[in-house]
Image: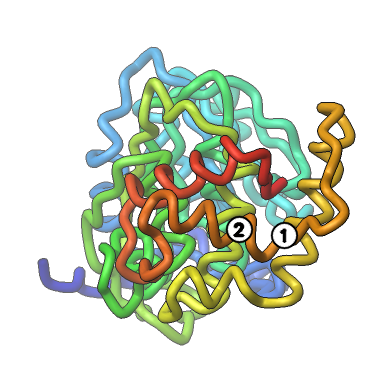
Amino acid sequence: MGKVKVDKKSRIHKSVEKHGIMFNKNFGQHILKNPAIITGMVEKASIYPTDIVLEIGPGTGNLTAKLLEKGKRVLAYEIDVRLVGELEKRFLSTPYHSKLQIKVGDVLKSELPFFNICVANIPYQISSPLIFKLLLHRPFFRCAVLMVQKEFAYRLIAKPGDKLYCRLSINTQLLAKVDILMKVGKNNFKPPPKVDSNVVRLEPKNPPPDINFKEWDGFTRITFIRKNKQLSAVFKQTAVVAVLEKNYKSYASLNNIVLPPNFDMTEKINNVLTEVNANNLRARTMDVDDFLRVLESFNRQGIHFS
């Protein structure tokens, strides 16, 4: 799909500039100004009139306005109190004022309420933690349509063996179905970011995999330390062995397991990998089933990662 052409500067941006409000790059404030892209994001979300819509970083409210037209209510998280005032002023005398609930503060530190859909041009520096906050949120939401940096988007959908395949890829794909919906050139924002963007759609897997995500996350964190190395080499590293030995001794103590005087954690780890023929596997080519199989083998032997 080709890039969407840049539209003229909106009157809202002129109003913000008139009041001396400069966009704060520390908050990742790159305001989406092209109405065609905004309309496209809202259409891709398939919002019902009964939906509660979550928006993060509403900025000057261009996307917010479209969400208010479609949904029952919009919950908008904004960290910049200057823009909160502009948002309130923009919708104060409109029929949508009662449908908008603005929450001031850092969304990563907030307990999210119930919502059906998330549609947002999210601050790029919080993309990864925000996505996992959303995917681990309960009860389940239907989908999220998010604007993210181009390379970040391709990391989300990368497959085993791809250059961009990483811990972000495997962790996201464990929890959700991910699709790239459209490309967005950097000149569609004010101020323009340094890179182009993509709109992605995430649909949480419901029911989710029967797994402790903290355990999974700790395991993949270790395996991707050196994603091109064989697991046998990764799990021989002194720091890795030390962490797993500490965890295992805690497990043994809680379960009244007496360790022999000649206990060797490195040998125990190697035995687990050998049992499931995983010594020669490399994280960069392992899929979700491979990771689940190896993690389950470790857990069966009392070796934990959280």
Is 61 displayed left or right of 9 in the figure? Answer: right
Q: Residue furthest left?
A: 1
Query: x, y percentage for residue 95?
Result: 49, 23
**Residue situated in front as seen by the camera: 60 or 56:** 56
Residue 155, compared with residue 250, is above or below; it is below
Q: What mark, if any, has residue 269 been given in the picture? A: 2
Residue 95 is at least partly visible in this image: no
Q: What mark, if any, has residue 265 been given in the picture? A: 1
Q: Quadrant of the N terminus?
A: bottom left
Q: Which amino acid lies under the numbered mark 2 shown in the image of this protein?
A: Ile
Identity of the residue drawn at 41% across and 35% down:
67
Circles 2 and 1: CB atoms closer than 8 Å: yes
Is 22 displayed left or right of 260 in the figure? Answer: left
**Residue situated in front as seen by the camera: 50 or 212:** 212
Identity of the residue drawn at 61% across and 40% down:
301
Q: Which amino acid lies under the numbered mark 1 shown in the image of this protein?
A: Met
Q: Residue furthest front?
A: 261
Is 129 displayed left or right of 10 in the figure? Answer: right
Q: Residues within 10 Å of mark 2 (few under 14, many from 20)?
A: some
Identity of the residue drawn at 67% across and 35% down:
102
Residue 17, compared with residue 268, is above or below; it is below
Q: What mark, if any, has residue 160 been given in the picture? A: none
**Residue situated in front as seen by the camera: 93 or 299:** 299
Assign a secondary structure to mark 1. Answer: helix
Q: Residue furthest top?
A: 50
Query: x, y percentage for residue 224?
Result: 51, 69
Assign a secondary structure to mark 2. Answer: helix
The span from disc 2 to disc 1 (Cα, nearest Å) is 6 Å
Is 33 displayed left or right of 97 in the figure? Answer: left
**Residue situated in front as seen by the camera: 222 or 28:** 222
